[in-house]
Amino acid sequence: MPNIKPIWDLRNYTEVLKEVDATGRVYLTRNGHGEYAILTMAEIDELDRYRAANTLFEKLKAAEERAEREGWINADDLEKELGVFEG
């Protein structure tokens, strides 16, 4: 169950931060609506990895769509285009 607190609870921020460590994150509301989230550094690192993976998947999808439109090339032609030589 999410840990949701009114932003007013930050006046005792030490207790809120203890809960962040224990549960992973705390969501803060303002006027009864979700406004902020407090995360641990480990969660921020994980979020950054998800964002990087998502960016990679988006680029791969765009490349695949372009290849479908413009055509695929085989490995030999790719090596020639890149200037890769055996030997």
Image: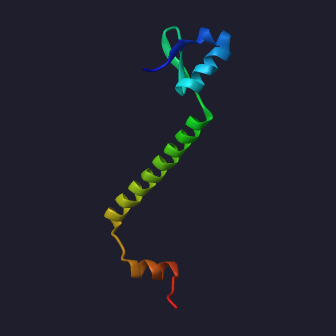
Given residues 60 and 17, the one toward you in this image is 17
Q: Position of residue 15 (x, y in %)?
A: 64, 15
- Front-lying residue, 28 or 76: 28
Number of numbered labels in the structure image: 0
- Relative to residue 28, is residue 72 depicted above or below? below
Residue positioned 62% across, 20% down in the render: 18
Which quadrant of the rendered structure holds the N terminus? top left
Residue at the spot x=66%, y=15% of the render?
A: 13
Residue 75 placement (x, y as % from top left): 39, 78
Residue 48 sits in quarter: top right
Determine whether, in the image, residue 55 is placed left or right of residue 14.
Answer: left
- Could you tell me residue 35's position as x and y percent? 53, 19
Q: How is the image coloured?
A: rainbow
Front one among 23 and 69: 23
70 to the left or right of 20: left
Q: Name above or below for residue 82 compared with residue 62.
A: below
Task: Residue at 51% x, 78% y: name it.
Answer: 82
